[in-house]
Amino acid sequence: MHNASLRELAAALAAKRISAVELARVFLDRIASAQPDLNAFVTLDEERTLGAAREADARIARGDHGSLTGIPIAHKDIWCASGWRTTCGSRMLANFTSPYDAHMIERLRDAGAPILGKCNMDEFAMGSSNETSFFGPVRNPWNRAFVPGGSSGGSAAAVAARLAPAATGTDTGGSIRQPAALCGVSGLKPTYGVVSRYGMVAFASSLDQGGPFGKSAEDLALLLNGMAGFDARDSTSLERVPEDYTRLLDRPIPDAPAGKPLAGLRIGLPKQYFGAGLGADVGEAVEAAIEELRKLGATTREIDLPSSDLAVPAYYVIAPAEASSNLSRFDGVRYGHRAEQYGDLIDMYCRSRAEGFGAEVKRRILIGTYVLSHGYYDAYYVQAQKIRGLIAGDFARAFRDVDVIAGPTSPSVAFPLGAKTSDPVQMYLNDIYTIPANLAGLPGLSIPSGFGERGLPVGLQLVGDYFSEAKMLGVAHQYQRATDWHRRVPPRY
Amino acid sequence: MSLQLDEVKRIAMLARIAVSDAEAAAVRDQLNDIFAMIENMQAVDTTGVEPMAHGQPVILRLREDEVTESDRHSGFQAIAPQTEAGLYLVPRVIE
C-alpha cells in the first residue's frame, strides 16, 4: 500500500478495499518506526490525523469524494494549519500553535486529505541540507550519513522512505527541487503566484512558492490540482481559470505518433548547466536521461543563458533583504519566543531574537539588513532586481526556440552531514541550477534519473515557460513510463 | 569591501539581534566571504534594465472598503508571550 500511486490509493478507497483510517494508520506506523533514524517529522498528532481520516471515510461512504479524499498528506512545517504546532524549524516558533489555516491547507482540507504530520525543514527555509533545523537534521533515507537536501528535507525524505504517500514543500531558491533530487523523488515548483502564500511563513516573498512532492509526475499533477488556486489574501496570487494539471500526462504533444510521445518537443540544454562545477556522476546520469527523452522523440539543442552565473549573487541579496524585512515581525510581543531575562523594550527584542534564531537565519538577517541600510539600497537590492530582469530575459529568449529546458537539478548527489556547514558560500552553490527559475518566476520540477556516487540519487530538472506545468508534467510522465528510476525505494524502506 | 567589527555590531543592532564580541567576530568573516561572492554582480552593466519583482504583469488589487474579518483577538492573544485585559504587555516605554 505504501508504494501505491495516488490514483491507485483513490481507487482502493472508493472501492472500500481500505478505509482512510486504515490508510492513515499504515503511514503513521511507518513514520513511528522510521522517525528515530530519519527525523523527517517535527510534529505528529495521531488523533487529529485519524479524526480527519474518519471524516474522509464518512464522505466516501456518502459518495462525496474527489481524487485526494482520504489520502494523508505530510506538510512542510512552514504551512500554518489550525490547531497544529507550526515551528518553521525554529526555536522562535517552537511553541507556536497556528490559529488559522493556510489557503493551501484549507484547500486540501476541503478536498478531504488528512494532515499526516508536519515535516522537518531548514530553519525558516534557509538552507540546502536540512541541517539548520532547530529540531536536528533530517537524514537521507538512501544513506543516513548523508543530507536529504533542503530546505524541504523532511518532506522529501518522508516521500522517499514511503512514510507519506505525498508531501508539500516550498521553493524559494530550490527548496523543493534540490531535496527531491537528493532523495530520489519527484518535486514541482509551480509558476510564481499559482499556489497562494497565505499562511506560509514568509521567507523571501517575491520568490517563495509552494508545491508538491510525490512518487511520480502523475502524483504531482493530482496534488497541484488540489493545491493551486486564486486567493485574494495573497497580493501576488494570480487570478486564472482553474486548470486540470493531469490533462497532458498521456499526450503532452497532441499530434505525436504512438511510440514517440515526445515527437515535436524541443528541449533546450543550457551550456551553463553542463560546465565546470557539475559532478561527473551527475552529468552522466543527466545525459542518459536526456538521451531517453530523445528516444521518446524529443529534439535537443544547446541554449545560452548568459546571466546564469549572476543568479546566486543576486539571490543572496534579494532573499536576505526580503527575509530581514519579513522576519522583523518576530519580536517576542505577539507570538513566538520571548527571552526570560531582559531590561528595556529594545533589549527584549534583541535577546528574544538572539535566542530564537539560529546562526544561518541570523547571518541572512544581517546580510539583508546591511544591503537595505542607508546608502546601499541601489547598489545591492536594485542592482539585484535588474539582474533578475536580465535572467528572466535570458529565459524569454530561450523559450522562443525551445519548449522546455532540461539539465541537472543539483551539481552533486547528497553530501555527508556536516560537510558544508562551516562554509556558507559552498552551501549556497548547491542551488546554482535551481535559483534562476525562482528569480524569473518560472515553473521547475525535478524527477529521479538514476544514481551517482555511492548509489545516491540524481535528479533531472525541467524548467518550463510560465504556466506550462501541465506540459512539463506530461514530459516527466512520459519519461517515467519509459524508465523506473522513480519506483526505486531506499533498501531499508 | 570588508566589514569591520563595529559595522557588524551596528548592523546587528539595526536588526535587533544581540551579539557578543566573539559572535560578531565569528560572523564577520563569513559575511565577508558572502559579500565577496555578491560583489560579482557589481561589475555588470545594467543601464536601462528595469528592476524586476514579479514574472507577471500584476497590479495591486483593490477591494471594497468594508470589514471582512471577525474579532478573533482572544484566539490570537492565547499564543502571545504576555497579555492582560486584551493588551500585549511589553516593558514600559514611557515613564
Image (tube, rainbow, N blue to C red):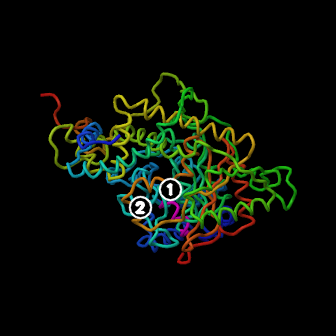
Q: Which of the image's four quarters has the C terminus of chain A?
A: bottom right
According to the picture, the residue beneath numbered tag 1 turns out to be: A430
- Determine whether, in the image, residue A9 is placed left or right of residue A366: right
The residue drawn where x is 65% and y is 51% is A271
At numbered mark 1, what does the secondary structure look like: helix, strand or loop? helix
Q: Which residues are magenta?
A: A153-162
Task: Give the CA separation, mark 1 to mark 2.
Answer: 10 Å
Q: Residue B64 at x, y = what percent? A: 52, 22
Any part of residue A364 in sight: yes
Point out residue A316 in the picture as x, y percentages from the top left corner: 45, 44
Looking at the picture, which amino acid does disc 2 mark? Answer: Lys
**Residue B60 falls left or right of residue A38:** right
Picture coordinates of residue B12, whole percent (x, y): 27, 41
The chain letter under disc 1 is: A
Q: Is residue A165 above or below residue A264?
A: below
Front residue of this view, candidates B24 and A220: B24
Q: In the rendered structure, does residue A158 fall within the stretch colored magenta?
A: yes
Residue A161 falls within the magenta-colored stretch: yes
- Report the predominant secondary structure element of the magenta stretch: helix
Q: Which residue is mark 2?
A: A420
Q: Is residue A213 above or below residue A309?
A: below
Residue ranking furthest to the bottom: A492
- CB contact under 8 Å: marks 1 and 2: yes
Going by the image, does B81 lie left or right of A56? left
Q: From the image, which quarter does the N terminus of chain A lie in?
A: bottom right
Amino acid marked by disc 1: Asn
Number of labels in the image equals 2
Give the quarter of the image for residue B10.
top left
- Indicate whether A279 appears above or below A365: below
